[in-house]
Image (cartoon, grey):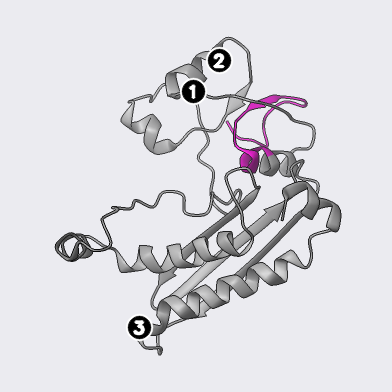
Amino acid sequence: SSLKELPQGAVIGTASVRRAAQALRSRPDLKVVPLRGNIGTRLEKIRLGVADATFLAEAGLRRAARDDVMRHPIDPSEMLPALGQGALCIQVREDDAAAVALVRHLACPATEICLVAERSFLARLDGSCSTPLAGLATYKDGVVSFAAEILSLDGSFHTQNKIEIDLSDRAEADHAGIVQKAAEDMADQMFETVPAKVRSELGL
């Protein structure tokens, strides 16, 4: 029912290098195997014994009405998500003023400012889906709280940091720039703690 309760040497199926690294950091005894496909395909592979457990989105399980699946929701304090995970974006042509104005009414300012932090951190480290980077920004009462981590592929190295960016007394027009700078500075500070061998391994 949870990562910690899996038996010694259990097999985790995932195609995510981030989740694999995070799982191995928590449980170095686990074995990680590639596991891809939709919900049904992955659950069938679990049933066939390809792996003992896998990672699936709770939203997907609910949409598929898979209440029968034993699962343990993972709190961000236990395992940070991918940077930008869960955010939805509507893309329009830059020169289409009418479309830009229309979708602006659908925008969530809190989500936007959180994404500035997450994407700035990711861009500063030139990260991709093949880099074990993670992070989550939240916004409350004018303060952006941003936690992020860098791991080695096998989870043996890990560095994590958290910052709070108070925007309550700053002009709204300056918010994005302030958050971007803070996230980039945190990325630089964390990068300095990463051993050269891990930097090479991750292509950072």
Contact between labelled residues 3 and 1, with CB atoms less than 8 Å apart = no
Left or right, residue 150 beside residue 61: right
- Amino acid carrying label 2: it is Lys
The kind of residue tagged 1 is Gly
Q: Does the image show residue 39?
A: yes
Q: Quadrant of the C terminus?
A: bottom right
Distance in Å between CA atoms under marks 1 and 3? 43 Å
Please report the residue visible at 72 percent of the width from the left and 26 percent of the height from the top. 7
Mark 3, residue position = 173
Q: What is the x, y in percent for residue 26?
A: 72, 43
Q: CA distance from mark 2 to mark 1?
A: 10 Å
| Numbered disc 2: secondary structure | helix
The residue located at (51%, 20%) in the rendering is 42
Disc sitting over residue 45 in the figure = 2
Foreground mark, 2 or 3, reads 3
User: Magenta stretch mostly in which secondary structure?
Assistant: loop
Q: Earlier in the sequence, mark 1 or mark 3?
A: 1
Q: Earlier in the sequence, mark 2 or mark 1?
A: 1
Does residue 172 lie above or below 84 as drawn? below
Q: Work out whether residue 67 or residue 164 is closer to the camera in this orientation and state it.
A: 164
Dot label at residue 37: 1
- Magenta highlight range: 1-20
Q: Is the residue 66 above or below the residue 168 in the image?
A: above
**In the image: residue 27, left or right of residue 119:** right
